[in-house]
Structure formats: C-alpha cells, structure tokens
Amino acid sequence: MVPGQRQWDNDLVVDIFNTRDASLILQVPFSTRQNEDRWFWLADPKGKFIVRSCYNVLNSVSNASNSKVWKFLWGLEVPGKVKHFIWRALMNILPTVDNLLSRKVEVSLICPICSVANEFVFHCLVECLFAQSYWLLSSLGTGGRCSSFFEWIEQIFIKRRKEDCKLAVMVCWRLWINRNDKVWNGHNGRAQNLVNVVGHYLFHWQEAKRKNFITVEQVQLGHGSVCWGKPPPGWLKCNVDARVFSSQSRYSFGGVIRDSGGAFIAAKCQSFPGLFRPREAEALAVREALSWIKNLQLSKIIVEIDCLNVYSALVSHDTSPNGFGLIITDCQALALLVGEVRFSFMRRSANVNAHNMARVRGFMSGPEEWKDVPPPWLCPMLTVSYD
Ligand SMILES: [Zn+2]
C-alpha cells in the first residue's frame, strides 16, 4: 500500500508478485471507511455463496467435454421440469428397473412396456418398440446409431434445429410419463396421442410465456431515460460515468453537474491507478462524484448513472460482503453526509457528457475541473442532450 493513503502501490505489487497474483491484488478496492475483514465468495457477483455458482466453477475447471450438452439443455426454451427430467436421464438417476435392481429393489429387469428387452434409460426413451413407434411418427426419425442416451441426445443437440431439440426433450419426458402410467395404472398409451399431447403442451406453454413473461431487465430498463432530462426546480443533477483503461491498469471518472434550467455548474475528470472491472469502476466513480459534490458543498442533487448494477445496488440497500458492496456502502454513507441525494438511472446512450468526461482521462492522473464555464469541447454536447 502507499504509506498514509488508502491505495495500492502499483509498482511494488507488480515487483513482488507474479502477474496473476498482482492482477488479483490490484482488483481489490479500498473502502474510505474502517471496516472489519470479511469472507466473501468470489464466484458470485453479490459475494454470497450459492450452489449454482459453485457448479459453474466446477464445470469451468473440470474441462468437461459434456459442458456443451448441459449448456444447450439449460438454455432450451422448454418447461423447467422437462429440463430437470432430461438432466436426471443423462445422469442415469431415473428409477428405471436396472437402477432399482442396483439398489436391491426386487423387480423384473424386463421392460414393462414392450416386454421384449431389459429396461434402462436408453431403452426406455429411445430403443423401446413404443418409443420407436413415436420417433418414426415424428419429424425426428429414429436417430443414428448410438450406444447411450447421452450420446443420442448430444447428436440431436448438435445436428438438429432448435425446434427439433425442444420436441425431442419434450417427447422423452412424455415417454417417461407414459411408461409410469403403464407401470402404476396399467394404461397403454398410443403413439399418435403422445404426438398430439406433446405438441399442444409445448405450444400453450410457449404462448403463456410470451404473454406473461417480461424480463427483469426490460422492467428495470423501463426506468432509464433515453435522453438527458432536467432535474426538478431547486435540484441539481450530476451525471457520472467511468472508463476502464485495462492496458494501463487505470480507471477514470467523469462528472458533469447542471441545474434545473440545464445550465452548466461544474465538471470534473480524473484518473486513478487500479485494475477494476467495469462494475467496480462505475461504483468507484459514483463515490468519487459524491466526494466532489461534498467538497463543493452542494446538496439537493440527483446523481445519475448508466450502470444498472450499480444503480440497483445503491437504491436497494442490499450490500454484498465483497469489494463492490464496500464501495456501495461508502457511497451511501457519503450521500448521507452530502444531504439530499437521489440516485437515478439513465441509458448509456443518454449519458454522453459524463461519458466523454471520463474518456478524456487516460493515464493522466491529475484532476481537471471546471466551474461555471464548461470546457469548449463540452459545449455542443450540453445543448444536444436535452429531452
Ligand atoms: Zn421396451
């Protein structure tokens, strides 16, 4: 660390540690307040341990050639229970008779549907006579020669159109329901019925999803203005942006303050050492802006940013136990000191002034500040960015 300052000594870190470690160390931001050390889970953006992120990490390090199959499966637009069923089939954990026998359940190994071969996952879903009668009726055919269910589904995922892949997994799921209906209720399904049921089910599920499902991103982006809007009378607005210069291990901050008439009040840009990801750099830029606003002794100010992650964290008060969360808490503490501060989100395309401010600063470190009179290159942009 630089003695007496809350920042890394870049040169020293690079000298002492290897490239990987130095890069990781320089990505750790400093808080402006005294905080106790805390553990957090690096593989999750919120720093909290969740099983899914652990699964993703293990997948990425295991170099599994199967990962494409899993990725494709989880991305398929079919009901979750169908994906889950296929996952169980691929993991060979369905209660087929061969699996029951291996767990010492006394059952006959013969397939309860066709009664001519032993039952295991591949037989039940692909090779069984009943399954074959469906596959022949469908547009998918019987598929090529495969020795396992995994290989079979992999071939479908690689060679077939996405619509066919959806149909294939839906049919497998339905074949299993049909098999259970036969085992437990003695009902014999008909291949043609199965074709119709699966087609209708998938069609209605997709329709319902289209009507009701609006992504979180769409809802949240709805708040984002598409061009700069004046703050209410008596209020100021500070547009903030950050830029990361990875090759120079630096990031920069830009801020432009205007009043409710759209008139220019002040602007500032500055760059700092640090190899942060964009999300952290955006949060650090907000912290820098609030500190600048505090020094200018301004209040009743709207701080507007174009990073949805940072905006959501600032307004939700859901702070993560990681470096990002620390910076957000710094921002919230600073905002309380400033007085009346509101946060607002605007689309990136509308945040041109702050964006250009941040861009001005590359590896130049000293701050540059303007009060009352904007720099000449900013003037044309101040007039075009009204709504
Ligand atoms: Zn069979």
Image (cartoon, rainbow, N blue to C red):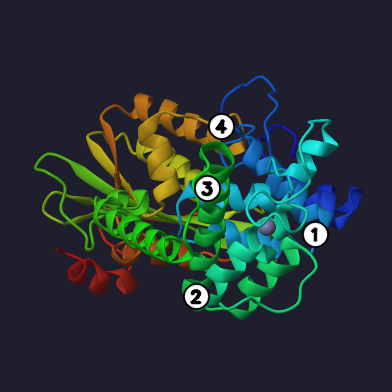
Earlier sequence position, callout 4 versus callout 2:
2
| 379 displayed left or right of 312 | left
| 328 displayed left or right of 312 | right
Q: Ligand 1 closer than 8 Å to the CB at disc 2?
A: no
Question: Where is residue 40, by image quadrant?
Answer: top right
C-beta proximity under 8 Å, tags 4 and 3: no
C-beta proximity under 8 Å, tags 4 and 2: no
The correct choice, above or below, for 167 with respect to 308 in the image is below
Secondary structure beneath label 3: helix
Residue at left offset 82%, top offset 33%: 103
Determine which residue is flagged by label 1.
64
In-front residue for pair 118/303: 118
C-beta proximity under 8 Å, tags 2 and 3: no
For the residues carrying marks 2 and 1, which lies nearer the camera in this image? 2
* Quarter of the figure with the C terminus: bottom left
Secondary structure beneath label 2: helix
Earlier sequence position, callout 4 versus callout 1:
1
Earlier sequence position, callout 1 versus callout 3:
1
Determine which residue is flagged by label 3.
177
In-front residue for pair 280/124: 124
Determine which residue is flagged by label 2.
137
Question: Where is residue 97, by image quadrant?
Answer: top right
Residue type marked 1: Ala
Does the rendering let one see residue 245? no
Determine which residue is flagged by label 4.
326
Earlier sequence position, callout 2 versus callout 1:
1
| 261 displayed left or right of 98 | left
For the residues carrying marks 4 and 2, which lies nearer the camera in this image? 2
| 238 displayed left or right of 142 | left
